[in-house]
Amino acid sequence: MLDENLVFHKTEAGAREIASPSRGLSPKLRRALILVDGAKAVTDLAPMFRPGEVEAILVDLQSQGLVSLAGGELAPVSSAPPAAAAPAIAISRERFDEIRQAAVREISHRLGPNGDALAIKVDGCRTPEELRVALREAEKILSSFLGAEYGRSFAQKIGRDLL
């Protein structure tokens, strides 16, 4: 497992890949490569992916020489099974309901009647995984109405609460 406080940066090869794609990275790997900026820790990147995915993504990018730790070091990876193979960290039903309702309130407050369909979709989520999927859509919609930074911060805050 990667230490959640590690901070990766793009290598020269990573910067070239962003400028001129040549490796045929999957959209998920490309998105991660774009997000790696030398400032975000693993814990900051995790809410932007499905639970347990970020470690495998960063290890893959590192193995391809596209990202590294400061000074070009390789991140130590334990031999423990990846987080995706481990059971998901469960949050209580009450906490999940609080998080979901906070998201619905924020969407309704910020978008008014324009956000009704989205608020209903979020309110219908029954699991953290369903809510994460709905949050990706909410991020896009909030970004289009209120700007990319607001959409991203909304999704990160709610996503972090789900961890």
Image (cartoon, rainbow, N blue to C red):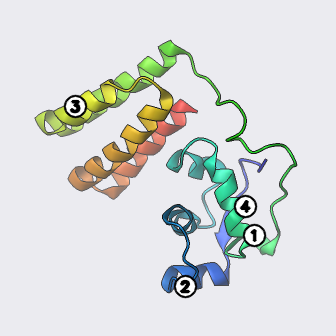
Which numbered disc flags the more N-terminal residue, 4 or 2? 2
The reply to whether dot 4 and dot 1 touch (C-beta < 8 Å) is yes
Circle 2 sits on which residue? Answer: 22
Q: Position of residue 84 (x, y in %)?
A: 67, 41
- The one of 39 and 11 positioned closer to us in this rendering: 11
Amino acid tagged 3: Ser
Circle 4 sits on which residue? Answer: 59
Label 3 or label 1, whichever lies nearer to me, is 1
The reply to whether dot 3 and dot 1 touch (C-beta < 8 Å) is no
Q: Position of residue 94 (x, y in %)?
A: 48, 13
- The one of 1 and 148 positioned closer to us in this rendering: 1
Circle 1 sits on which residue? Answer: 63
Q: Quadrant of residue 29?
A: bottom right
Is 124 rendered above or below residue 73? above
Amino acid tagged 4: Val
- Between the C-alphas of marks 4 and 1, the distance is 6 Å
Amino acid tagged 1: Ser
Is 42 rendered above or below residue 111? below
- Between the C-alphas of marks 3 and 2, the distance is 42 Å
Q: Position of residue 145 (x, y in %)?
A: 21, 51
Circle 3 sits on which residue? Answer: 108
Q: Residue furthest left?
A: 113
- The residue carrying pointer 2 sits among few (fewer than 14), some (14 to 19) or many (20 or more) residues within 10 Å by Cα, namely few
